[in-house]
Amino acid sequence: EKEQHTKELLRQRLSKIKCTLMVMSGKGGVGKSTVSTNLAAMLNMLGHKVGILDADIHGPNIPKMLGINEKGVLSSGEGIIPFEPVENLKVMSVAFLLKSDDDAVIWRAPLKHSLIEQFISDVNWGELDFLIIDLPPGTGDEPLSVAHVIEGVDGSIIVTTPQEVALLDSRKSVTFSRKLNIPVLGIVENMSGFVCPNCGEKIDLFKVGGGEKAAKELNVDFLGRIPIDPSVVLEGDAGKPYILEHPDSEVSKAFKEIAEKV
Ligand code: ADP
């Protein structure tokens, strides 16, 4: 009976969400959360209603990147109220449920699964054009739960860096998506070159172009490359969406191109 109730709630919530996208990466530290946050902010800036579901249960960084330091959640008759740091940009994260940022989550897979389920069924997302789901790196329990709970995720975006290892790992994300019948929207190559703040010249710190090559080999689209910009780290730490602070930068242009493709 409870299961039936949850299924019905899920159906109702999901019927109001036009497009569900999951953001994946083969390994950590490639900028997955940065891409999720800024892509969401860019889509919002382009006039869309956007939600971000932070499904990175063990390392929930999205609230910090958006400057949300509050703990605890409120609910109304319509369900849990997501945070809305910018109008029409809603956020839900396990970080809100932890007593402090140093708390560690030690949950087994079934609990993680029901948490992800509740993050969709019990949260009053309302009408959304996009629900961006930020996943932990790899192809473990969380992406599987998301795929099972949503039953028909509209697409996956795979974030990688130009180095070979990250690329190899991202192949697994492509295989994972294909196995679960989730269309791969494409690969984003993050930390791709560095624009010198003094002279504007572009310096390729790592090999550039690996993401595009991998996309070709794996027969998926290449969504674009995002250069390294030291302000990304600063704004991320300060809790301000980078693209809102630096709308005319190379990085923001890259996000705009990506947002127009999804
Ligand atoms: P992940 O979610 O893959 O673990 P994060 O998004 O947390 O990665 O990014 C890891 C670190 O790299 C963060 O400190 C972030 O600010 C920084 N970072 C990500 N993308 C860029 C970029 N394009 N330029 C500069 N720093 C970046």
Image (cartoon, rainbow, N blue to C red):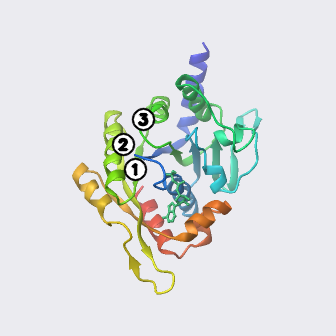
Give the mark nearest the N terminus, 3 or 1: 3
| Disc number placed over residue 173 in the picture, else none | 2
> Which residue position is annotated with label 3?
152
| Residue 15 picture location, percent across and down | 53, 36
SS of the residue under disc 1: strand
The residue closer to the viewer here, 73 or 111, is 111
Q: Is mark 1 within 8 Å of ligand 1?
A: no
**CA separation, marks 3 and 2?**
16 Å
Residue depth check, mark 3 versus mark 2: number of the one nearer the observer: 2
In this picture, residue 193 sits left or right of residue 41: left
**CA separation, marks 3 and 1?**
17 Å
| Residue 186 can be seen, yes or no | no
The residue drawn where x is 59% and y is 48% is 51
Crowdedness near tag 3: few (<14), some (14–19) or many (≥20) residues, C-alpha within 10 Å: some
The residue drawn where x is 57% and y is 32% is 116
| Residue 162 can be seen, yes or no | yes
> In the orientation shown, which residue stands out farthest toward the bottom?
199
In this picture, residue 22 sits left or right of residue 96: left
Residue 260 drawn above or below residue 90: below
| Residue 165 picture location, percent across and down | 34, 51
> Which residue position is annotated with label 1?
158
Specify the quadrant that holds the N terminus. top right
The residue closer to the viewer here, 92 or 33, is 33
